[in-house]
Image: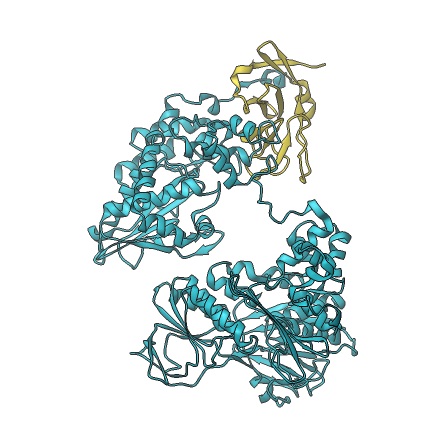
Amino acid sequence: MMNWVSIGSLSDIPRRGARCVATPQGKIAVFRTAEDQVFAIEDHCPHKGGPLSQGIVHGAAVTCPLHNWVISLETGKALGADEGAVRTVPVRIEGERLFIALEALASRAA
Amino acid sequence: MTEKLVIIGNGMAPGRMLEHLLEKAPDLYQVTIFNAEPRVNYDRIMLSPVLSGEKDYEEIIIHGDGWYIKHGITLYKGHKIVAIDRQAKTVTSDHGVTEPYDKLVIATGSVPFIIPVPGHDLPGVLTYRDLDDVRAMMLAAQSRAKAVVIGGGLLGLEAAAGLNAQGMDVTVLHVMPTLMERQLDPAAGYLLQRAVEQRGIKVITKANTQAITGNGKVGQVELADGTIIPATLVVMAVGIRPNAGLAKEAGIAVNRGIVVDAGMRSNDPDIFALGECAEVNGMVYGLVAPLYEMARVAASQLAGDVAAAFVHSDTPTKLKVTGIELFSLGDFAEGEDRQEIVLRDAAAGVYKRLVLRNDRIIGTVLYGETADGAWFNDLKKKQTDISQMRDTLIFGQSYQGGASLDPMAAVAALPDDAEICGCNGVCKGKITGAITGKGLTSLDDVRAHTKASASCGSCTGLVEKLMVLTIGDKYNPAAVQPMCGCTTLGHDEVRRLIKAKSLKTIPAVMQELEWKTSCGCAKCRPALNYYLVCDWPDEYADDYQSRFINERVHANIQKDGTYSVVPRMWGGVTNAAELRAIADVVDKFEIPMVKVTGGQRIDMLGIRKEDLPAVWADLGQAGFVSGHAYAKGLRTVKTCVGSDWCRFGTQDSTGFGVRIEKFMWGSWTPAKVKMAVSGCPRNCAEATCKDVGVICVDSGYEIHFAGAAGLDIKGTEVLGLVKTEDEALEHIVALTQMYREQGRYLERIYKWAKRIGIAEIKRQIMDDGEKRKAYFDRFVFSQKFAQVDPWSERVSGKDKHEFRPMASVGFAQAAE
C-alpha cells in the first residue's frame, strides 16, 4: 500500500529546478519542469553518486553537475550513450500540495 | 618465439612501418625504439603550420605515449644510438643503454645542410628540421626583429611564411634566379615570388651568402655583391643530406645514403634502412609518399613477405603556405622531343603548364588553381594518350566532353584508382569504399580509417568532395559546428542574431531562432544566459536556473556533494584580522580542509550546502566578499610585491593588481579569466601564462594576453607597452570587453585570440583609440549591474530555497 507523505507545495520548487527531501534512506530530489510537471527520483546519479538535485533541468531531464550524465526524470534512466538508472519515486499533486510515496522507499531499504 | 626488433629513429617512416607491421604480424617481434629526439612520433610535414601558429604541437602528434604502451613497444626518448656492434648484434645509446637485436631498422633520417660560410656557427643561426628548431624560431620571433632565411625552396619559403606570420621582418635569400627552381619553371617561380612579396616578405634571388657576422651572436648577413642585411635570426634551409654516419661506422655499405635493395635490406641481411637516410636504386628521397612506400615494403619484408619491393614513382610537390596554391609534378624541363601547353590568366594569377612527350603527360606545373592536379597526375601515371582531348586538356577535367564546370563533377569523374592523397598513397576507391562500408560521416572518421588527408592535409578538399558524392547531405563540409543538439546554429550566429533581433530572454532566443527542444539543454542554456547577460546588462534578468550549480550557489561543488568556499583576497594580499576570521570559521563549521590555491587565495573545502549562508555571514563580518572562484568570470589577479618591497621592482605591481581586481570583479566572461601583475621581467607572479598578464618595466607596463597553463600550455602574446597605470587599465579592460563580446561560451582567451587573430586584436585595442574607449565604456556600464556581492545577498535571504531541504519525512516510520 502506498503511503503518501506531504512534502510541501508546488511553489516551493523553482520552475526548471529541484529541491531535496530528506528521508531515512537518503535524499530524494523533487523536480519541477517548465510545464509544472513534478518528478521525484533518488538524489544520486548512477554514475558517481552526484547530487542530481543540483543539476540543470531541461525538458523532463536533468544533467548531473559532476560529469554531465543526462537522467530522464520520468524513467530514472540515463539518456544517450550512458547506461544506468536511479530509482523513481511516485508523486501525487493535489491542488498545490505535493505528496511522495514513502513505501517505495521502505521497500528499497529492505 | 618472438624476435627482437630494434629501430633507430622515431620519425614518420618507421612509425608508419610499425603500423603496417602490427597489422600484418602483431606478435612476431618485441619492439624497442631509440629516438634521439625526446618525444613521440609527430607529423613533420605539419611543422610549418605550427610555426605560423595555425596548429599546436599536440595537434600534429601521430602516436601518443599511449600508443606505445598499448602495443608493448619500448621507446627510449632522447637516446641517440652511438654504436652498432654487428658481431654481437647490439646497439648502444649515448646514455649507455645496450640492446640486443635480431633485426635492426635504421631510420636516422637526414641532417640539414649547413653552408660553411664564416659565422655559420654563431648563436642565432638555426636550421628547420624538427620541433626544437620550430620552438627556437618562435622564441626568436617574439622579438619582432629581422630574420633572414637562406634558401628559397619548399622548406625555406614555408619557414619564411611562418616567421612572417609570427610578426618578423623576413628576407629570403636564394642563390638561383627563381624560387623553387627544382619544382617550378621560371614563369611559376616568378608568380610565386610576387605572391611571397605581397605578404611583406623580401626576396633576393641570385644571392650568394658570403658571411654571417655579429658580436657574439648573429647581427647581419653579408652577400658576395657587398649587400648587408641586418638580422638577429638566420634560418638555413638549403637542403638535407642523408644521416648515414652511424651505419658507415658500423661498416654497412653507404653511398649518398645507406645502400639498400628494393626490399629495404642493407648489405647486412639483418639490418634494414628506410626513410631519408636510405638510398634505393641510386635515389634518396625527402617527400613523405615514397618514404611511406618504403615503410610498407620494410614492414612486409619483416613480416616475411620477401617479394615486397619498392618502386620509384614521381611525387607531386605542394607548398603548404596558406593562400598560395602550387602544384608541381614530374619533369618539366624543355626539350626537343617535348611539347607544352600553357595557360596564363594574369588577372587571376593563374599559370598552368603541361609538358607532353608522345601525346602523354610527363610533367605539370600548376599555380593559383590546382584542383586538376590529381587528374593530371592520374593521366601521367597511366600514360594516357591525350591526343583526343589535347585542345581542351589544359582547362582541366571538368571541361572535357563539354561537361559542366562543376568541381563535384570533376571529382565524380575520377576513376576509382585515381590517387587522392599523395602522402599516404590512398586512391579514390579506397576512400569511397571505407565511407560506404564503414558508414563514415565525418572527415575525422575518414582520416582515421584510410589516412587520406591525414598528413599534410592539402587534399582535404578532395576528400570532402568525395564524402559529399558518396553520402550526400549526411556530410556538409560548410556547416558550422552547432552550439548543441537543440539548434543548427553555431555560437557566433546565435550571438549575432541576439543583437540583430534584440532578443532579450532565453525563451525569445529559442522561439525566434527555432530551437528544436522546448527548453534547451545543459549546454545551450548556460551559453545563452551568458550571451544575454553580456549583451543586455541593464535589461536582462539573469536566469539562475540556466546557470551551472557553482554559479547558482556561488561556491564550488565537490565530488561528495559538499562545497568549497574561496573569499576574495584582493591581489593576493591579506592580514591578521582576515586570517583570524578564516580560522574562526574553519573551527566553527569544522571545515575539514584548508588549502592555498594557485591564484594566491585560501580555499575552504568540505562545507555542507546548508552551512554556506552561515559561513558567508561570518566571513562577511570580517569584510570578505565572494572570490568568484566558481565563476566563468574574473577570478583572481595574482601579484608580486613590486616596488614597495622588492629590490628589483620597477612599479607598484601589488597596488596595480588590487586596482584591476577592484575594477573588474563581478564581471561575467565566456570562460574563466585569471590575471597577474609582475613588478619586473623576473616575473614572479607568472604573468606570462595567464589570460591577461602585466610585466612592469622601467618604461611602463607591458600588457600580455592569451596565455594558458592548464590543458594546454602556452606563453602569452604581447599586446603592447603603455606608459602609465591608467592606460594599462584601460587597455586591459577594453581587451576583456572585446573578448566578452566575441568569445564563444567556455572558450578561453587564448582560443578566442587564435580564432580572431592576434594582429586584429592588437589593431582594435592598441591602434584604434576610439574602439578601445568604446569597449572600455561598455565594460564600465555593465559593471554597474554586476558588482553586487552574491554572498551578502544570500546572507540577506536571496534564494533561500537553494540552501534548505524542502522537507524531512519518513523518519518516524523508519523508527517503528
Check the image and name the residue furthest to the front: B391
Q: Position of residue B321 (x, y in %)?
A: 51, 64
Check the image and name the residue furthest to the top: A95
Image quadrant holding the C terminus of chain B, namely top right
Q: In this rendering, is residue B606 above or below A6?
A: below
Query: How many numbered dots are placed on residues in this image?
Result: 0
Residue B594 visible to an observer of this rendering: no
Give the residue at x 61% y 59%. Answer: B66
In the figure, the shade used to draw chain B is: cyan
Question: Which residue is more in the foreground, B415 or B67?
Answer: B415
Image quadrant holding the N terminus of chain B, namely bottom right
In the rendered structure, the answer to whether residue B203 lies left or right of residue B393 reads: left
Q: Where is residue B314 in the image (x, y as percent from the top left)?
A: 66, 75
Q: Position of residue A56 (x, y in %)?
A: 55, 31
Chain letter tied to yellow: A
In the rendered structure, the answer to whether residue B633 lies left or right of residue A58 reads: left
Rendering colour mode:
by chain
Give the residue at x 63% y 32%. Answer: A71
Residue B53 visible to an observer of this rendering: yes
Q: In this rendering, is residue B438 above or below B47?
A: above
